[in-house]
Image (tube, grey):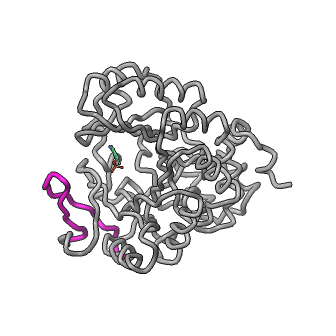
Amino acid sequence: MHKSECYSDWEGQISHRISTRDQLEKYIKLTPDESAAFDAEVPLSFAITPHYASLLKNDALRRAVIPTHHENVFRADELDDPLGEEDHRVTPHLIHTYPDKVLFLTTSFCSTYCRYCTRSRMVGKPSTSSFEETFLYIEKHTEIRDVLLSGGDPLTLTDAVLNKILSRLRQIPHIRLIRIGSKVPVVLPMRITDNLCSILRKHRVWLSLHFIHPAELSPQTQTACQKLSDHGISMVSQTVLLKGINDNTQTLVDLFYGLLEINVKPYYLLQCDPVRGSAHFRTTVEKGIQLIRSLHGHISGLAIPQYVIDAPGGGGKVPILGNEQIRREGDGVFFINYKGKEYYYPDPPSK
Ligand SMILES: *Cc1c(COP(=O)(O)O)cnc(C)c1O
């Protein structure tokens, strides 16, 4: 029996998380570079669930969650807070960037940390302030219609805490849509219990799920998504475009069709944010355009997400369809957001 099967419930998976080099070496043999990364001061927390560790035979997934020395290489145009979220933080837990939607950071905890995390500045670090100020802000701001719960991963909260947050939000008459952003069905599929499904269903929550590769579509993850779907929960996916992990047409086609087969609609293909130490994960924007154009017309339209750049500095997500929309200059590209303002994305070095 594989180790991951010893922890069939989600609390067991969390308490047996792999968070040291020694624990990780029980699953896979580390390369010298991976091993050395544990000796360096790694800014981002390290943790992987036993379930996800059981998938690490796949090299692409391995690169996404195991630190390397590249993380400590900082480029001049990379930022701790690439999306300018701190400038739009209106309460300790709330980011209000767009006019009618808000990002509610419910927890800084994830069961598994992605090395390219756009919120590496805060995940894995405890925060204790209460949600009251955030609820009051949302209640007062009647222009808000859409609340996106994120973090950290909100589905690592207990059923009781989630139910409380969702009940409070559902009492606000101007809130029309509640979404949860999560990677739990991928990294912690046993968290998708009947009780959790009933809570999500009761509050009519949409799930926005983080998937990067078809190897993440394990039998347990397929079962979890099928269960969510059977409970009537609507699901979309968000995929970060990652160099050497999913930056080729075949991988993306396999992932997007695989998602449709478990009732998850591909929603966004995101250009990787220029967070500090991310150059080894980022592709050029030109590569992103080439990939999205290799899909349009060639596969089911339903399987194609929108390719977006989240404008560094807080301009919001900008859909990119082709080269007409971008202006290349120096080592990056300029593009225009929904307010007509120009933003810059720094491409990674070409070699
Ligand atoms: C991505 C994001 C949202 C949601 O945007 P959609 O394009 O509607 O999915 C809301 N707020 C912030 C700050 C975001 O980054």
The question of residue 350 being in magenta is answered with: yes
| Quadrant housing the N terminus | bottom right
Is 50 positioned to the left or the right of 98 in the image? right
Instruction: Where is residue 310? Give x, y as percent.
Output: 31, 55
| Quadrant housing the C terminus | bottom left
Residue 329 appears in the picture as rendered: no
Instruction: Where is residue 68? Give x, y as percent.
Output: 54, 60
Give the camera-side residue of 221 and 78.
221
Question: Residue, x 54% and y 27% (percent of image)?
Answer: 163
Give the camera-side residue of 89 and 264.
264
Instruction: Where is residue 40? Give x, y as percent.
Output: 54, 51
Q: Relative to 338, say whether 172 is above or below.
A: above
Give the camera-side residue of 317 and 245.
317
Question: Residue, x 37% and y 36% (percent of image)?
Answer: 147
Magenta part of the chain: 329-351
Counting labels gives 0
Question: Residue, x 36% and y 56% (percent of image)?
Answer: 273
Q: Residue furthest left?
A: 340
Instruction: Where is residue 262? Give x, y as percent.
Output: 59, 59
Q: Relative to 124, say whether 237 is above or below.
A: below
Residue 283 appears in the picture as rendered: yes
Q: Relative to 195, say whether 250 is above or below.
A: below
The question of residue 223 being in magenta is answered with: no
Give the camera-side residue of 274 and 342.
342
